[in-house]
Structure formats: structure tokens, C-alpha cells
Image: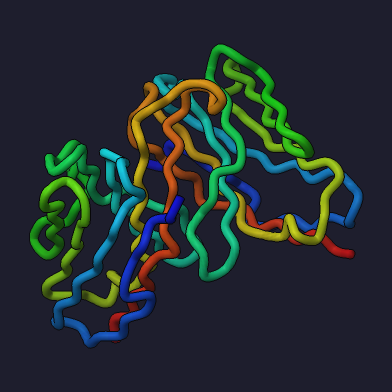
Amino acid sequence: EAGVAQSPRYKIIEKRQSVAFWCNPISGHATLYWYQQILGQGPKLLIQFQNNGVVDDSQLPKDRFSAERLKGVDSTLKIQPAKLEDSAVYLCASSSDRTGFPNSGANVLTFGAGSRLTVL
Amino acid sequence: DQQVKQNSPSLSVQEGRISILNCDYTNSMFDYFLWYKKYPAEGPTFLISISSIKDKNEDGRFTVFLNKSAKHLSLHIVPSQPGDSAVYFCAASAGAGNMLTFGGGTRLMVKP
């Protein structure tokens, strides 16, 4: 099966500018996630969608970040205006919600390659 | 407040030897634990998982051990190979199908 597609792979902007990232999950995966990974740290969840509804956006800085998932498939994450501390890799992931054997019942996320943002 | 911690930022091991990566958690509601591997310029890829009803899960060269009383899990790689050199993240969730909380990662270097 095709993996999670993300674009652009790299983006360099100046602070106060805006940027948008796009994600196409694995076909049939109902749940989509956006994670932020700052250099040297683990991924941190920004927002989780179930189909086109938001499940969890408690860690999304809503004054500058927004995300949408139209028609329950593709998703976009926007930052406006960007700050220096937004420099990070933005990872999109999806899951099928079909937990159970053989993954011990765990919710296995499949990640895209990420979009690296540099804010100058 | 970091709920999942990987206290060793890096680990160097000789090829053929055992690699042991450790992870601690604080949230007693976590009942599913996963390990992901990440190569540079790629997204994390799933490696192995364990639920809290078990204390060990094995998949080829990879074994994950869970000590619930100590809130500690470890990943053993035997034998280690140069291709195993990557950053390893442990992750946990409270309930099947729920969001994953990640640790900060451990960079493993396997020397030929």
C-alpha cells in the first residue's frame, strides 16, 4: 500500500510569514494526526482527526496554528504568523483504528517523511 | 511534564552485541507501549509493541520487556547490526486506539 504522503519536504520562511503543509494519509485510514518534532525531542501531538472531526487539539497553539481535514481524507496544517520557535519537522500520521493482534492491541501509527520548517 | 522519558540520548554498541534501550513512564493509565525507529530524513517506522497484560514480546531480533511496577520498559536488540543505527523512540497510550505520547528518543550507533 502507498504510504503517508506529505508536502513540501522543506520550507524556509521568515518570521511572521505564513506556511501550509499538506498530508494525504493511507487510503482507508480514518484517523489522522499532526505531530511537531523539534530537533532533539520526540514528536508532540498537535491535533488528531477522526474522519473529518477533531478528536484532540488541546496542544495546538490556536492563536497561530490551524488544521482542517476536508471530506475525511487529505489534511492541511497552517501556521500564521510563524515564530522562530516553530522551526521543526511536522509529521503527519494515520491509523486504521483496527487494533488487535498482531500488534498487541496497540494503535500503530504510520508516519509520513515529514515537512521540515525553518523560520528565520 | 514529560510522561514518557528516555534518559539516554545516545548509545554506542559493537556489531553482534546486545543493544538495550530504556524508557520510563509516569502515567499509570498507559497500557499500550510501542517502539519506533527513525532514520534521518524519514518518518518514524513502527518496530514492536506490548500491552500491559504482558511482560515480554518478541519479534525476531527485537524483544520488548515491560515492568509495570517500575513503570519501565526496555528494547533489546540481539545481535545488533550496523543497519540498526537510528534514533529509537518509545511511545505509550492510555487505551487502544488513543493518541501516542512519545519519549525524547535514543540515538543508537552500531559499530562494525
Residue positioned 55% across, 41% down in the render: B90
Q: Nearer the viewer, residue A75 or A16?
A: A75
**Residue A90 % position (x, y):** 34, 63
* Residue A38 lies in quadrant: bottom left
Residue positioned 61% across, 50% down in the render: B88
Q: Nearer the viewer, residue A62 or A104?
A: A104
Residue positioned 20% across, 57% down in the render: A75
Q: In the image, A64: left or right of B37?
A: left
Q: In the image, A15: left or right of B44?
A: left
Total numbered badges shown on the rendered structure: 0
Q: Quadrant where the C terminus of chain A lies?
A: bottom left
* Residue B54 lies in quadrant: top right
Farthest residue to the front: give it.
A1
Q: Nearer the viewer, residue A16 or A108?
A: A108
A117 shown above or below B43? below
* Residue A96 lies in quadrant: top left
**Residue B82 % position (x, y):** 80, 61
Q: In the image, B99: left or right of B56?
A: left
Residue positioned 46% across, 67% down in the render: A39
Q: Nearer the viewer, residue A35 or A93?
A: A93
